[in-house]
Image (cartoon, coloured by chain):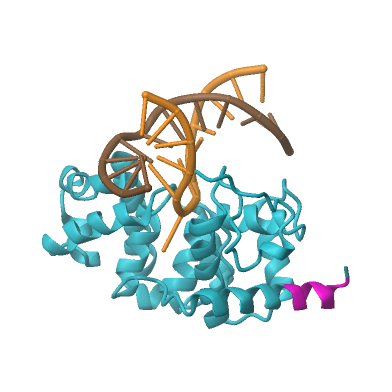
Chain colours: A cyan, B orange, C brown
Amino acid sequence: MSDKEIGKRLKSIYRLLLEAYGPQHWWPGDTPFEVLVGAVLTQNTAWANVEKAIANLKHERVLTFSRMINIAPEKLALLIRPSGYFNIKTKRLRHLLLFIHSQYSGSLSTMFAADPAWLRQQLLEVNGIGPETADSILLYAGEKPFFVVDAYTKRIFSRQGLISGNADYRAIQDFFMENLSRDTRFYNEYHALIVRIGKEHCKKVRPLCNACPIRSRCRRRVQVSNT
DNA sequence: GACCAGGCACATC
DNA sequence: GATGTGCATGGT
């Protein structure tokens, strides 16, 4: 398949998803700081559990940079407990906050004014910030055009036959970014739609059901039993 | 009760 | 470099 055909295919899938589900209005957060915190809390975690943790943080009024960096780690862990992995996530949040404090004086707007590629490298050096979390922060908190790759992206697009099943993060991200124009709004919506269809149709073991908007192109099309 | 969720770091081979 | 494991709560 030529590059031109791949680009058309990716845009076609995007259109199908948008027609089926409409705009997803991501990221679900009121401020860039809330988005950044949510990006850590949602690591391998259902969003509904993250919402409970965010609600706790809001109720205790610690969802700002200066408040969160100053509260006791034990208290932070207690508040984010519903999002799971609360001890490790407390450490990861603190690593991230200390990085922003030392490098950007605790200012997200200063941080996002830095060269995006350089900032991405810096974020990846923070313990607890991997490629998906870094790209989520860059795209959804900083509005920088980085395509976010997650488990659903890999599963869905390998089933579509567009990427290899053993492609790594960078290879998959390059695949999208080399075949789609670098557009923050577009990347925002595309990833959100992938998560949406992933939750409904493309879970790890569940086969696609007949209502899947891209089923006709899916290699793993399986008849669903009556359960 | 098993499986899954919008990952990541680290140990081991 | 690839593979396995710990981290943990809450919904289905």
Q: Is residue A165 left or right of residue A126?
A: right
| Whether residue A102 can be seen here | no
Which residue is located at x 49 percent, y 64 percent? Answer: A196
Q: Is residue A206 above or below residue A163?
A: above
Magenta stretch in the rendered image: A2-9
Which residue is located at x 34 percent, y 60 percent? Answer: A38
Task: Say which of A19 and A55 sits in front.
Answer: A19
Q: Is residue C5 above or below residue A85?
A: above
The image shows residue B4 at horizontal and vertical percentages of: 48, 43
Which residue is located at x 33 percent, y 53 percent? Answer: A93
Instruction: Answer whether residue A139 is magenta in the image.
Output: no
Q: Is residue B11 above or below residue A36?
A: above
The image shows residue A186 at horizontal and vertical percentages of: 57, 80
- Residue A86 sits in which quadrant? top left
Can you name the residue that lies furthest to the right here?
A2
Q: Is residue B10 left or right of residue A71?
A: right
If the image is split into quadrants, where does the N terminus of chain A sit?
A: bottom right
Which residue is located at x 71 percent, y 64 percent? Answer: A216
The image shows residue A158 at horizontal and vertical percentages of: 71, 54
Instruction: Answer whether residue A6 is magenta in the image.
Output: yes
The image shows residue A37 at horizontal and vertical percentages of: 33, 60
| Whether residue A55 can be seen here | yes
Can you name the residue that lies furthest to the front here?
A226
- Residue C8 sits in which quadrant? top left
Task: Say which of A130 and A106 sits in front.
Answer: A130
Task: Say which of A27 and A111 sits in front.
Answer: A27
Task: Say which of A201 and A61 sits in front.
Answer: A201
Mostly what secondary structure, the magenta segment? helix
Can you name the residue that lies furthest to the left here?
A60
